[in-house]
Amino acid sequence: MESVARGGTRWRRFAVVMVPGVAATAAIGVAVAQGALAASFSVSGQQFKVSADKLDGQGFAQYGGLDVESDGKTGHAVAISSFEDAKLYNMCQSVVTPNVPLVGTITLRLNAGTDAKNPATAHNLYVDLDDLSGEATFSNIDIGVAAGAKTRGPALAKNTQSGAFAQQAERAVIEDVKQTAWATTAGTFKLSGLHMSLHKGVKECY
């Protein structure tokens, strides 16, 4: 199966909103603990928050992954959520950088897709996250498939071993999205109505 390089993170909590059942979450945790998931490339060690009124994704797949920080010593487990195509309505992304010399704490915020008729769109979207909340609806969902045998979503990430636990759905719609992530990548990402701003202090998306 075709693979693509992906990043990873750790779990403080792996929210069950993307998995309609605690057993599904536990299965991914066990795979990480047993070393079934391989590391790929380094992550910065700094998280960011993403919110959206709604995420409407076609071709959804999710599975566990693992990566390390650039020091090569700190490992992070991640739930990799992937979509062939996704629309994000009223999307916000924020990252807080503390202790900036002469300035103090700074928050970088990015807003896009604020026009309901012109949402942000992404193709072959991957989100490495460790916390997610929202109201989720799945269409034609399969839970407990082997990651290497999945038939939906973009190509399997390199940092997941074939046979690892996965779930997939024809469509996933999540409203009132709030997630903490370490990495987001996409083949194409159209940020309609993009606005980027810097704020002194902590001014996160949620």
Image (cartoon, rainbow, N blue to C red):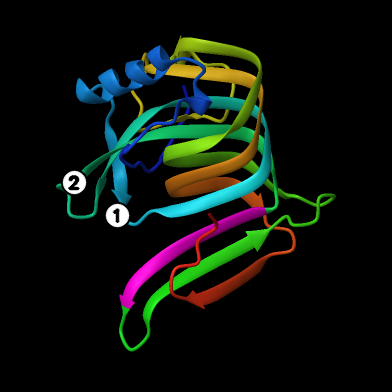
Residue 98 inside the magenta-drawn segment: yes
> Mark number for residue 74?
2
Report the residue at 53% width, 51% height from top.
50
Residue, disc 1? 45
Report the residue at 55% width, 57% height from top.
205
**Farthest-out residue, right:** 117
The x and y percentages for residue 154 are 56, 30
Earlier along the polypeptide chain: callout 1 or callout 2?
Answer: 1
Q: Along the line of sight, which residue is nearer the eye, 46 or 8?
A: 46
| Helix, strand or loop under label 1 | loop
Report the residue at 50% width, 67% height from top.
203
CB contact under 8 Å: marks 1 and 2: yes
Label 1 CA crowd tier, 10 Å (few <14, some 14–19, many 20+): some
Residue type pointed to by label 1: Gly
Q: Quadrant of residue 194?
A: bottom right
| Residue 84 visible, this orientation | yes
The x and y percentages for residue 87 are 71, 42
| Helix, strand or loop under label 2 | loop
Distance, label 1 to label 2, CA atoms, is 9 Å
> Mark number for residue 33?
none
Q: Quadrant of residue 44?
A: bottom left
**Farthest-out residue, bottom:** 102
Give the vertical position of 195 relative to 84 (above or below): below
Residue type pointed to by label 2: Thr
Segment tinted magenta in the rendering: 91-99
Give the vertical position of 44 relative to 55 (above or below): below
The x and y percentages for residue 184 are 49, 48
Q: Quadrant of residue 131?
A: top left
Main secondary structure type of the part rendered in magenta: strand
